[in-house]
């Protein structure tokens, strides 16, 4: 009589428990893939286990195991002719009591236009970072994330087949990643997009980041746009300046709503808009504000009908007080306001033609940009005052 091996005895004598693997199969345009075969192929299990998708594209593969049994399985689906499956497979280690959900597949036509998202990882010294996991998730409900590991140059390349917005994030155990996530658009207008992540091991840098870009009327970068930022509901304004590339950025300690206000000190130009608001969240920790620096073609300041000139104010910037020299013309209206237009000082009495006035801000007044206006019957004089504490 043939002896039964141990595995056969377990199968015969032990009660069976059904592990389960389930997911959704859909076409790249979101339609459910109906009657598509999904399969589990084990390393030591003798036979593949099959299931078909239903009318909604759902599949469930029951795997009857003896109690305590486990195996490693490839979970795959069989796309119809002319399609490829993404991902090609899932490799899972399954025990007799496991229930695995969300093993989803997307079926894409062969020859679909390919877009590329390139992710670069660098360490604090700017050298390639070669460990960690990079995920790329289409920013749509129910989308399937794709994963990759960096090559020798710290690079991960994702081949994408759908024009969409993607969320890229990096996981590196024991390290801080800056930014923690990046949202980018990839498509026909931007078929190859590159994003960079810094992997830091010694100091913490907040994953939240405010990015500012200043451009002219054709989108070229503008240097030296002055921007102040503050958390919503506070007056804790902090200054930054755009560089030669038109960009400036800061890393707030936390998420939330942040207010921005901008000014450009070169005469004959104005900023549109000169006020902005950004919201940072754990899902979208990076946001960008765009400011346009435009020539004042009317020669009067935006929205005004009088010719505009500059007043003489010094020192500017200032940190205690500033001397303002008024033109030798009768005054109609004069005052100092903040960048939102709120009047801080009414100078109608102090502003005498041909004389000077020294302004010392009250201690409670925050540092920032203030606008000095002096209007006569013929002209409008203005100056931007930069108050630094």
Image (cartoon, grey):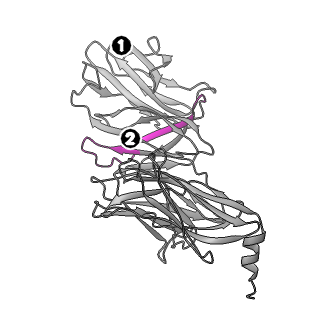
Asked if residue 232 can be seen in this view, the reply is yes
Give residue 364's quadrant in the image.
top right
The answer to whether residue 345 is above or below residue 113 is above
Residue at 33% over, 12% down = 330
Q: Residue furthest front?
A: 1
Marks 2 and 1, the one that precedes in the sequence: 2
Left or right of 339, for residue 69:
right
Mark drawn on residue 263? none
Q: CA distance from mark 2 to mark 1?
A: 37 Å
Mark drawn on residue 290? 2
Left or right of 145, for residue 194:
left
Which stretch is magenta? Answer: 213-234
Q: Quadrant of the C terminus?
A: top right
**Label 2: few (<14), some (14–19) or many (≥20) C-alpha neighbours in 10 Å:** some
Taking depth in this image into account, of 271 and 22 the one nearest to the observer is: 22
Give residue 99's quadrant in the image.
bottom right
The answer to whether residue 76 is above or below residue 138 is below
Taking depth in this image into account, of 33 and 6 the one nearest to the observer is: 6
Residue named by callout 1? 331
Asked if residue 243 can be seen in this view, the reply is no
Residue at 36% over, 26% down = 382
On the image, the x and y values in percent for residue 276 come to 45, 33
* Residue 218 magenta-highlighted: yes
Query: Mark 1 falls on what kind of element?
Result: loop
């Amino acid at each position: 009589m043939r002896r039964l091996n141990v595995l056969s005895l377990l199968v015969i004598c032990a009660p069976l428990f059904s592990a389960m693997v389930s997911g959704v199969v859909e076409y790249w345009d979101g339609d459910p893939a109906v009657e598509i075969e999904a399969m589990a192929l084990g390393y030591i299990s003798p036979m593949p286990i099959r299931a078909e998708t239903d009318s909604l594209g759902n599949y469930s593969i029951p795997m009857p195991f003896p109690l305590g049994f486990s195996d490693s399985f490839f979970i795959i689906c069989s796309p119809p002719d002319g399609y490829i499956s993404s991902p090609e497979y899932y490799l899972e280690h399954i025990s007799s009591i496991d229930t695995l959900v969300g093993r989803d597949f997307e079926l894409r036509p062969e020859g679909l236009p390919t877009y590329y998202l390139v992710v670069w990882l660098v360490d604090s010294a700017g050298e390639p970072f070669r460990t960690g996991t990079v995920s790329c998730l289409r920013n749509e409900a129910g989308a399937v994330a794709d994963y990759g590991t960096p090559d020798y140059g710290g690079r991960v390349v994702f081949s994408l087949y759908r024009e969409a917005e993607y969320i890229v994030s990096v996981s590196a155990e024991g390290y801080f990643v800056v930014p923690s996530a990046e949202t980018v658009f990839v498509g026909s207008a931007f078929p190859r997009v590159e994003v960079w992540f810094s992997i830091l091991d010694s100091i913490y840098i907040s994953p939240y980041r405010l990015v500012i870009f200043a451009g002219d009327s054709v989108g070229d970068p503008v240097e030296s746009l002055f921007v102040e930022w503050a958390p919503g509901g506070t007056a804790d304004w902090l200054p930054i300046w755009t560089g030669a590339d038109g960009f400036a950025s800061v890393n707030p300690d936390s998420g939330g709503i942040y207010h921005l206000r901008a000014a450009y000190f070169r005469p004959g130009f104005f900023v549109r808009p000169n006020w902005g608001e950004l919201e940072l969240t754990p899902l979208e920790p990076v946001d960008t504000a765009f400011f346009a620096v435009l020539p004042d073609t009317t020669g009067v300041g935006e929205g005004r009908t009088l010719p505009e000139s500059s007043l003489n104010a010094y020192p500017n910037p200032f940190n205690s007080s500033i001397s303002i020299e008024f033109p030798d013309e009768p005054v109609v209206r004069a005052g100092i306001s903040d960048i939102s237009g709120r009047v801080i000082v009414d100078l109608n009495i102090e502003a005498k033609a041909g004389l000077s006035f020294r302004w010392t801000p009250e201690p409670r007044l925050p540092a920032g940009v203030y606008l000095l206006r002096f209007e006569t019957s013929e002209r409008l004089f203005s100056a931007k005052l930069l108050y630094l504490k």
